[in-house]
Amino acid sequence: ANALSDEEALRAAPVQLRARLSANENPFGPSEQAKQAITESLTSCYQYPMQARDLIQKIADYEGLKPENIMLDAGSSPMLLAAAVHFGQRGAIITGDPSYADLPRKAEKFKAPIVAVPLTADYKLDLDAMEKKLDSRTALVYICNPNNPTGTVLDTAKLKAFAARVSKKTPVFVDEAYIDYLPDPRDSSLLEAVKQGQNVLVARTFSKLYGFAGLRVGYLVAQPEMIKTLSQYAVGPMSISAPAIRAAVVSYQDQAFTQDVLKKTLASKQFLYDVLKREGYEYIPSSANFVMFPLKMDGKRFVEEMGKRGVSIRNWEFNNQHWCRVSIGRMDEMQAFAEAFTQVS
Ligand code: PLP
């Protein structure tokens, strides 16, 4: 549904940005401890990054997984690519519309048919409709939860029941890039399904809540055989720099830091909601660090006009409607958005 990738949108944005609200980054990270770990690790940067095992073990211990369940790479994009290469050669990919398009787009390059299923009336992934699309040619079901770009989250019990049923027929890939923004990430996650032995793949990233988008650390959790299979299509931990791995080790589950990020994100989000309400706009209540709202003008023109005022955001078109997605930034960035929005809308 979306025309540009995050990267393309930022490249097209004006150089002098006052507010960078187009790539769902987290400007409240990385943590001070992460930055310190990076600085301290610089002197040993002549060595290859061998600490990946520490990070894998830390994640395994916290989540009750085995290291064989975990594959580490430079962000979760490599996992999406590995899955696209592997499953894209085997059959069709079922996904939401709109949803995060990276995996389906890459799978398309391998001739995979893409079955894009419209969202429900409340802008959630339509699990029932997606399940109905399953047939003998389906190679993978891709579920982005919370969903990008709508910010909606699925009912946990419903998703778990869906995964338990569907994964008996076809692998279910759950992209949990934004799961850390939920009040109960552990309860909402599908990691439990992996632990139960289901054919479920869960992608996670440090790019969002931990503020690592530029550092590049992510992981995939799946059955050991699946991890082995997909590892064929990825470089693995050797593609992550040693400072980034060290920073991830000290950041992981640093509750003081993550609670602070959540608090600031919520304050900026509330500010944005208030601005939209004041200007007479609706919005989709968001469970992530971005908010989608329907525009009253052409989306492309809106992006251009906001860009002229130093604010980068993204536009979408679906349900015969132009939409804007605003990433949650620092308060000064949200104020810059409000100022520009008042002029443009
Ligand atoms: N998955 C979703 C849903 C995303 O929105 C993004 C990036 O915005 C990614 C995956 C990829 O992020 P990264 O490669 O930084 O982990």
Image (cartoon, rainbow, N blue to C red):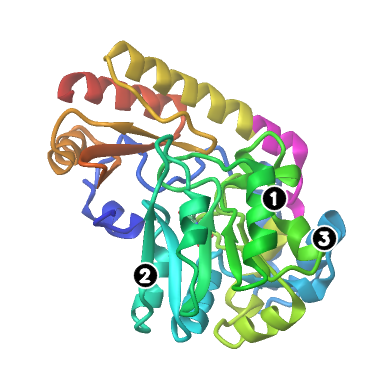
Q: What type is the residue that disc 1 sits on?
A: Ser
Residue at the disc numbered 2? 114
Q: Is residue 312 depicted above or below 220 in this figure?
A: above
* Quadrant where the N terminus is found in the figure: bottom left
Q: Position of residue 226 (x, y in %)?
A: 68, 80
Q: Earlier in the sequence, mark 1 or mark 3?
A: 3
Q: How far apart are the alpha carbons under marks 1 and 2?
A: 25 Å
| Residue 279: quarter of image | top left
SS of the residue under disc 2: strand
Relative placement, left or right, of 255 versus 266 is right
Magenta region, residue range: 250-260
Relative placement, left or right, of 66 versus 282 is right
Residue at the disc numbered 1? 189
How busy is the neighbourhood of tag 1: few (under 14 within 10 Å), some, or many (20 plus)?
many
Residue for point 70% across, 37% down = 257
Is residue 30 in view? Answer: no
Q: Earlier in the sequence, mark 1 or mark 2?
A: 2
Q: Is residue 148 depicted above or below 218 in this figure?
A: above
| Residue 111: quarter of image | bottom left
